[in-house]
Image: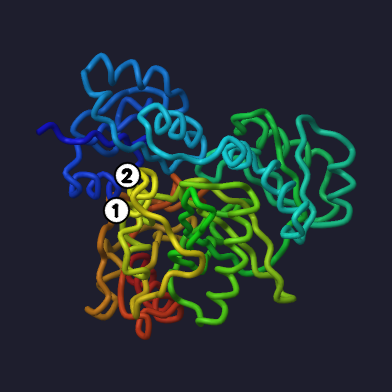
Amino acid sequence: MDKPVFLLLGCNILNQGILDKFKSYGGFVVVIDRNPHPAIHGDLNYQLDTRFPDPIIAKLKEDGLWDRVKFAFTCQDVAVSSMTMLGRACGIKTISDEGLRHASSKGNMTKRWAERGLLNRVSAQFQKFDDSIVRMNRQWDTIIKPDNSASSRGITILEKDAQLDALKAAFDKAFNESTDEAVVVEEFVIGTEFTVEMLGDGEGHAAVYAISKKTHTKNVDRNKIAVKLHYNSIDDALQQKIADYAIRCYKALDFSNCFGHLEILLKPDGTLSPVEIGARSSGYIASDLVDVVSGRDFLRDLYEVQNGRLTVSDGLVPQTSQSSMYFFYDLPAGKTINQVCNLTEFMDQAIKSRASERSQLVAGTRTHNIDSDNSRYGLEVLEGPKALMTGQYVHEAEQRLLAHMLS
């Protein structure tokens, strides 16, 4: 019998875990990306733009594969619309049109959250620079970002009362990275960031599978680049509070039959504010990290929901006694790698790395600031006992690593 065909939109190395999962399901995997040098290889690779479904369908029909397509998946915000159209064309359940409209624009989602009393900060969308952006910056520190983009590109954080030239440069930077020629300008709020991994069905239910505490690098120029996502690392009461709020944010946008990757902020006064959400998850998060802490096969559950064989229950999925972490090597700029080593050498053997990328950890490398998700130095996908693998424990191991590597 011919294998079912799974479409993976995006060839980023972080999608290797997704590819491996699809293979374990017995699928024939087609990786699609316009990059002529893909970082991962499926059973077949197409060099096509992930944003446009029609050429993808035409190529699959030409190769006699279209009738076997059962699932389409992406980790790219810019490809969510294409993934949805591909899914509908092959007969699976997808996000609604209204949900897709919100998912495709940070301005749309924050406007809806504000209408529902969920936002708790000032946010506005612009198609061109005007004086109201200056007035916003006179009142608050400001973050300026593309309305729709990928890999944390085009983001600038400016202090209150920034120079006009700096504001205009930040706007132009965001506009040039935006796929829809729009820019979002927001009050920049200091707080603790979390990510929430959700799955909703077509019956109006949404489940939270995992919550991570997020850490950003300081080795960056006026941007926010995550270097740690630590799952199942906070107390039960806070997890429940975040989960309840996240489900309200998911449902407010009319999401259905899709993942929800929500970034959410815990402000110093204890209130929560959603930052943004994608109708997708991310590589290694969807294939490994969520599975460790939820005890579920997160990716398969999405597959079953979209094929009408599974509904979920509202609320937080019971968490295991394990913790997991997306750890990105965060090297201070202006240093030289003298000793090649990796994080696991400085940790207890009870903590394992399920996957890693260490090819840039090369002796003699001169380090630099990072400006996007794609410019980080490598990663570990960690799992270990929650009682042992605390944030403090990982931080101390990281400091020993850096002292040895950069000695």
Residue 85 lies, in percent from the top left, at 46, 29
Q: Which is nearer the eye, 14 or 62?
A: 62
Tell me which amino acid carries mark 1.
Glu
Q: How is the image coloured?
A: rainbow
Kindly identify which residue carries mark 1: 357
Q: Is residue 204 left or right of residue 166?
A: left
Q: Position of residue 223 (x, y in %)?
A: 61, 51
Q: What's the amino acid at mark 2?
A: Ile
Kindly identify which numbered label has been placed on residue 13: 2
Whether residue 148 is visible, yes or no, is no
Disc 2 versus disc 1: distance between alpha carbons? 8 Å
Indicate the secondary structure of the residue bearing disc 1. strand
User: Where is the N terminus found, in terms of image quarters?
Assistant: top left
Q: Nearer the viewer, mark 2 or mark 1?
A: 2
* Residue count near mark 2 (Cα–Cα under 10 Å), binned few <14, some 14–19, many ≥20: some
Q: Residue furthest left?
A: 1
Extreme residue toward the bottom, this view = 387
- Residue at (75, 45) in percent of width and height: 185
Mark 2 and mark 1 residues within 8 Å of each other at the beta carbon? yes
Q: Is residue 73 visible?
A: yes
